Amino acid sequence: MDAFLSHTTGKNIWQSELIRKYDLAGPRYTSYPTALQFSDKVGFEQWKAAVDNSNAQQTPLSLYFHIPFCDTVCYYCACSKIITANKKIAEPYLHKLMREISLQAHHISPTRSVKQLHWGGGTPTYLNHEEMSAIMSAIKQNFAWLNDDSGEYSIEIHPAGVDTKRISQLRSLGFNRLSMGIQDFDPQVQRAVNRFNSQAEVKRLIQAVRQQGFRSISMDLIYGLPKQSCNSFARTLDCIIELSPDRVSLFNYAHMPHLFKTQKQIDARELPEPQEKLDILKLSIEKLLSAGYVYIGMDHFAKPDDELATAQAAGTLQRNFQGYATHADCDLHGFGLTSISAIGDVLIQNVKQLNEYAEKIDDGVIPHFQGVVLSKDDNIRKAIINNLMCHFQITFKEIETVFNIDFQHYFAKELMLLKEMQNDGLVQLDKHGLYVNTAGRLLIRRICMVFDSYLHSGAHTPTSHTAAKRYSRII
């Protein structure tokens, strides 16, 4: 089964009729339950109990740091960010962030190693080298940093704000993986979304990244942006393939200005028509697979020897709030505005407003504001959804052994709902398990939705108007 899951062709994965039928709005499943189930009744007490349990087990750590600042706004952006050209605005936040590091670290065993670290945003490289050095020093003082370069330590950059000297500085700080937001190389598209980086600039950075010994380079692209066409995006894809990053993320632009105000600056009349958008995605999949990339899942592709691909083959791939990740054994601790932590059975999020974040830190309080404690049912469904998202299969016996249930009885309703998908060729069902066919891989979110009890228990059903407004479409 692994070989079947790891290698596919654009022809087999692309089934137009099935895409039209199953392309609904739904969660991306970076967590289960999703953030819609978070409550302000979950706070420090639940977080502390989860941390104490992980300390006893010496669970390794994954640390995420949210740097919310950007010089300019990208009109498509749906991230939590603060747009300002005044770099001094960031100084108070950085002091609070370093204070939060010590507040959380006070409760975490200092012998738990940091296997993963990621800086996201916003634009982390908005900060200057001295500011980044101060944060990194605080991290290394408070946590068990791996000094042998064996950790997976990554940072997101905007190519237009980085030069080759900065690449060298990032490596000296300990980063060994790097993610670039490219989105599109076409000048007309860039003007339409206010995001600029030329192929020549990116090529210089890639050369510097490789010279400095970074172990992985990832590039983000977005399809469905204004002014895009199959022809224009084909040129961008050719450039990306020539640059040869280790990973490529191909995100669907969801135009939701009712949720993200910056998207109101996009002229909806310039967005590609639905069929053109589908054609762009189909072309992208075909080109990337033909170039030798492996389809990891959803919108991620990787070279066969990249750690995402090898983790998938080894059965250790997982999804979390950063997307696909290679260490399933880590607790995730988030720092900064809006960041989310996943510790044992507890998911918990930091506050979203800068002033509230500052007030809580000044009071010596970890700045949580909402979360959820997973029930046994949540954990069962989380395991199923993670297996489907990462490995495209469920072995019933494994779930039964871990959770002491009879799968066929427990999920009788869900298995009945899957019959139509089986008849349509998306999945295979037998007495041993559920296997996602090649044609179902692009629609994996829709398959996972069958096992989401929250979608079927209230207003957020897969076909409801509320869900369509809250979630992006699958394709």
Image: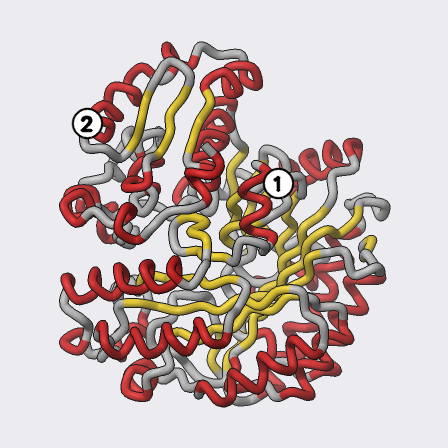
Query: Quadrant location of the N terminus?
Result: top left
Tell me where residue 377 appears, x and y as whole percent: 46, 23
Q: Residue at x 74, y 43 (%)?
A: 60
On the image, numbered disc 2 is attached to which residue?
A: 423
Question: Contact, CB < 8 Å: mark 2 with mark 1?
Answer: no
Say which of 328 and 75 sits in front: 328
The Cα atoms of the two marked residues, 2 and 1, are separated by 33 Å
Question: What secondary structure is found at the residue carrying circle 2?
Answer: helix
**What colour scheme has been applied to the protein in the rendered image?**
secondary structure
> For residue 58, which numbered disc appears in the image?
none
Say which of 403 and 229 sits in front: 229
Say above or below: 80 vs 106: below
Q: Residue at x 50, y 65 (%)?
A: 353
Say above or below: 397 vs 181: above
Say which of 16 and 187 sits in front: 16
* Mark earlier in primary sequence (2, 1): 1
Disc 2 marks a residue whose amino acid type is: Asn
On the image, numbered disc 1 is attached to which residue?
A: 328
Question: What secondary structure is found at the residue carrying circle 1?
Answer: loop
Query: Is 338 left or right of 196, judged from the image as shown?
Result: right
Q: Quadrant of residue 96?
A: bottom right
Q: Is residue 425 visible?
A: yes
Q: Residue at x 46, y 44 (%)?
A: 6
Say above or below: 121 vs 408: below
Disc 1 marks a residue whose amino acid type is: Ala
The mark closer to the camera, 2 or 1, is: 2
Tell me where residue 22 appears, x and y as whole percent: 20, 42
Q: Residues within 10 Å of mark 1 (few under 14, many from 20)?
A: some
Q: Residues within 10 Å of mark 2 (few under 14, many from 20)?
A: few
Tell me where residue 456 appears, x and y as whole percent: 28, 30
